[in-house]
Each structure stands twice: as C-alpha cells, then as structure tokens.
C-alpha cells in the first residue's frame, strides 16, 4: 500500500456511482462512514459503518465485502472520514490476506468507467468525490 495516502486515493464521481447503482450492479457496495448524520439521508442500498466502529468492525467488513468487485466509501464531504476509512480498510484487507498466505499489495489501477481505483485482490476501492453533500446535488 506504499504511496497511497488520503490525498492520492482515487475518487469516483457521483455520476459514475449513480450509473452503477442504476444498473443494480450486485458486485458493488457503498459504505457510508458518517455517524449520527446518516439519519438525515443516505444513498439507497448503502451500508452504514460509523467511524467510531472501525477499530472492531473493519475485519468483519473485509470478510463481508470479499466478493464485491467495486467498493465506494464516503462521508459527508469525503475529505477525512471516508478517505481514512478506505486506508483502514485496505490495511486490514492486506493484513488478513497476509495472515492467510495470500498477500497482495494494494495498487492504483484503472478501474471501471475509466476511473482510477485502488485495487487489491480483485477488488477496486474508491472514495466518492464530494461525499454525500455532492451526491445530494444530483
């Protein structure tokens, strides 16, 4: 995961995410890391994994999402909580795979819809550009 940090994480546009959701892509997951502000509205079909649960919830999230090809994380603005969650997710995914003898480093690659994503073990991970605030402007 060297070279990948909050500022270099690939972003997915709201239009690209809307297209994936509209296509009812079963191999895609949206992870909303907002806390109490989730109640005020959310992306249909998304999973709420609040920031304050990440220390103990991340291993289970990695197991739950193992068969998903595309995972998109977001918070309100996708400036801190969402990107931080992606980094935790990628570190945990690499750690779990290394303990199973299946180590593969995360790398930035071209993903679906011509967007760069972070790929590790057949899964491409993004941060939603502009977060839920921009999503609502669609």
Image (spheres, rainbow, N blue to C red):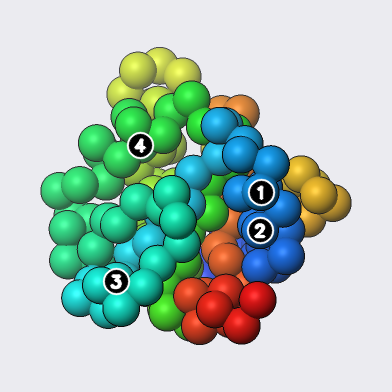
Q: Residues within 10 Å of mark 2 (few under 14, many from 20)?
A: some
Real-space Cα separation, disc 2 to disc 4, in angstroms: 23 Å
Closer to the observer: label 3 or label 4?
Answer: 3
| Residue labelled with disc 4 | 62
Circle nearer the N terminus (2, 4): 2
Image point (81%, 49%), residue name:
113
Mark drawn on residue 22: 1
Circle nearer the N terminus (1, 4): 1
Real-space Cα separation, disc 1 to disc 4, in angstroms: 25 Å
Q: Residues within 10 Å of mark 3 (few under 14, many from 20)?
A: some
Residue contact between numbered discs 3 and 1, judged by CB atoms under 8 Å = no
Closer to the observer: label 3 or label 1?
Answer: 1
Q: Residues within 10 Å of mark 4 (few under 14, many from 20)?
A: some
Residue 121 visible in the shown view: yes
Circle nearer the N terminus (3, 2): 2
Residue contact between numbered discs 2 and 1, judged by CB atoms under 8 Å = yes
Left/right of residue 82 with respect to residue 16 in the rendered view: left
Real-space Cα separation, disc 3 to disc 2, in angstroms: 19 Å
| Residue labelled with disc 2 | 18
In the rendering, at what x and y percent does residue 76 appear?
42, 79
Name the foreground residue: 34 vs 15.
15
Closer to the observer: label 2 or label 4?
Answer: 2
| Residue labelled with disc 3 | 38
Circle nearer the N terminus (3, 1): 1
């Amino acid at each position: 995961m060297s070279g990948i940090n909050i500022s270099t994480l690939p972003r997915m546009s709201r239009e690209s995410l809307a297209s994936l959701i509209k296509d009812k892509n079963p191999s895609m997951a949206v992870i909303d890391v907002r806390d109490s502000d989730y109640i005020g509205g959310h992306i249909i079909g998304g999973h709420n994994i609040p920031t304050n649960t990440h220390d103990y919830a991340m291993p289970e999230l990695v197991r739950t999402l193992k068969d998903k090809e595309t995972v998109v994380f977001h918070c309100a603005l996708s400036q801190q909580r969402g990107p931080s969650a992606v980094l935790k997710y990628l570190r945990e995914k690499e750690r779990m795979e290394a303990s199973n003898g299946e180590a593969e480093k995360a790398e930035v690659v071209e993903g679906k819809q011509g967007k760069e994503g972070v790929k590790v073990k057949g899964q491409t991970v993004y941060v939603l550009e502009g977060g839920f605030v921009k999503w609502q402007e669609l």
